[in-house]
Image (spheres, helix red, strand yellow):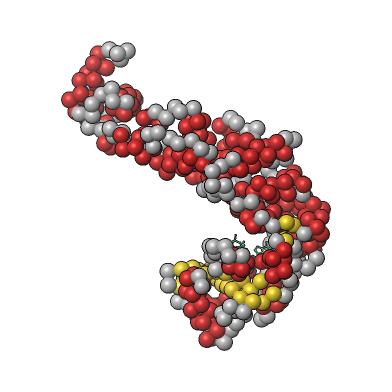
Amino acid sequence: ANPLFQKAKSVMKQIESHGYEAYFVGGCVRDTLLNLPIHDIDIATSARPEEVEAIFSNTIDLGKKHGTVIVVWQQETYEITTFRTEDTYSDYRHPDNVKFVRDLQEDTLRRDFTINALAFDIKGKLYDYHGGKLDLDAKVIRAVGNPMERFHEDALRIFRAIRFASQLGFEVDGETFRSMKALAKNLNQVSMERIRVEMTKFLQGDYFANSYQLLIDSRIYQHLPMLNILNIQAVLDQLSNKYQAMIDYPYVFSEAMSWALLLMELPYQSVVDKQHFLKVWTHSNQLIKDVKHITELIPVFETNQLSPQIIYHYPNDILFEVEQYMQAIGVVIQPSVQQRLDDLPIKRRNDMAVNGKDIMALLNLKKGQPIVGELLAIIEERIILRQMENTKDAIEKFVEAYVADPKK
Ligand code: ATP
Ligand code: MG
């Protein structure tokens, strides 16, 4: 079996040896039954959060009042959540009452879809109270219980349905889908961070091309920031075509690349608009920067305008990623990004044979002045372009000549 499970079993044994029940739940069960790789292991237990903390020496409190404790065990982390029910969500976001229960079956009632309500015990026995196995086999996403009620409790589930469709290539059950449509407007009240997490997974899904229509037909898009646009159909058709044309489709990109590819199809093309779009979607500054670099670089790669300056100034990881993207759309970059990086005379400003202090001394400056920065930038550029040797001598000569006549 999967080595992750093997390791996790000793965590379960610990819990059980203290007299509590413990089960594998959620994505790891679903993905194992589908023969897909699993990313993380979620464990459900009858032990209360404090009881879990008492069993393990290394734990992290991840919302104990909602029942979840992270256990660090043999260099792995496990999300351990106490069996619970969720009563009502008057704000559509947070359960007002988390009630801990002692029984797995009751716990599964709060789970979103039948395929996510499956559990394994330590011996690998399957617990399936909602027909999840049948739905897995039929490739159907179906709400646990009454879909109107379930989506009313937490509107994020409406989006999760299409994210799983995109990841798994499943259909959404008819009644579940009608309820999604009826309650899509409640997504307005769900926190953007939660929606963003699901949106990223939706964009990265192996079956995006088969499932993006659900975003439109369910009218979910009308309740997503800056995506309620008239030509959403054309935008997503284009994006999907782009994906499908890729070699090795399905091809999974990084988070930044996925958002960059979406953004490139949207009518927000100015730097300000793009940044605004990503900010509204609550992305981190790092991701916003990466997306900016990616959207700048793709046209440069496409028009064969890769210069030594670009190779020098853009972050290496982004350059490699765009090169990979180009490969996926069938364009091989020659020489490769790696070769071009190796060919640079210097890799960073520190590699220059002079620094700001040297230039100040040369110009008899006591304090830094703008001219120092200007000169460094010009010299750096000339070195990168191999118009100047990276030696003290060559640089000093240049500085003297420049000061005498800046136009040269
Ligand atoms: P992934 O492979 O992306 O981690 P997952 O199914 O494990 O998929 P998670 O978001 O990690 O998804 O959630 C773990 C489990 O918790 C789900 O399988 C589901 O049973 C339950 N769950 C998560 N979010 C919700 C929600 N909003 N409403 C109801 N149940 C949920
Ligand atoms: Mg998970």
Q: Is residue 177 left or right of residue 236?
A: right
Q: Residue at x 68, y 49 (%)?
A: 210
Residue 170 falls in which quadrant of the image?
bottom right
> Can residue 352 be seen in this snapshot?
yes
Q: What residue is drawn where x is 63% and y is 74%?
A: 119
- Front residue of 169/82: it is 169
In the image, residue 106 lies at what x, y percent?
A: 71, 76
Q: Is residue 202 above or below residue 21?
A: above
Residue at 69%, 70% in the rendered image: 133
Q: Nearer the viewer, residue 11 or 349?
A: 11
**Above or below for 176 versus 132:** above
Percent position of residue 43, x then y? 58, 73
Residue at 40% over, 33% down: 334
Total numbered circles: 0
Instruction: Please state if 275 lies on the left or on the right of 149 as rendered.
Output: left
Q: Is residue 192 above or below residue 32?
A: above
Image quadrant of ligand 1? bottom right
The answer to whether residue 14 is left or right of residue 334 is right
- Residue 89 in sight from this viewpoint: no
Residue farthest along the left direction in this orientation: 393
Which percent across, then down, holds residue 7?
A: 47, 74
Q: Quadrant of the C terminus?
A: top left
Q: Give left or right: position of 217 versus 377.
A: right
Position in image of residue 179 (x %, y %): 80, 57
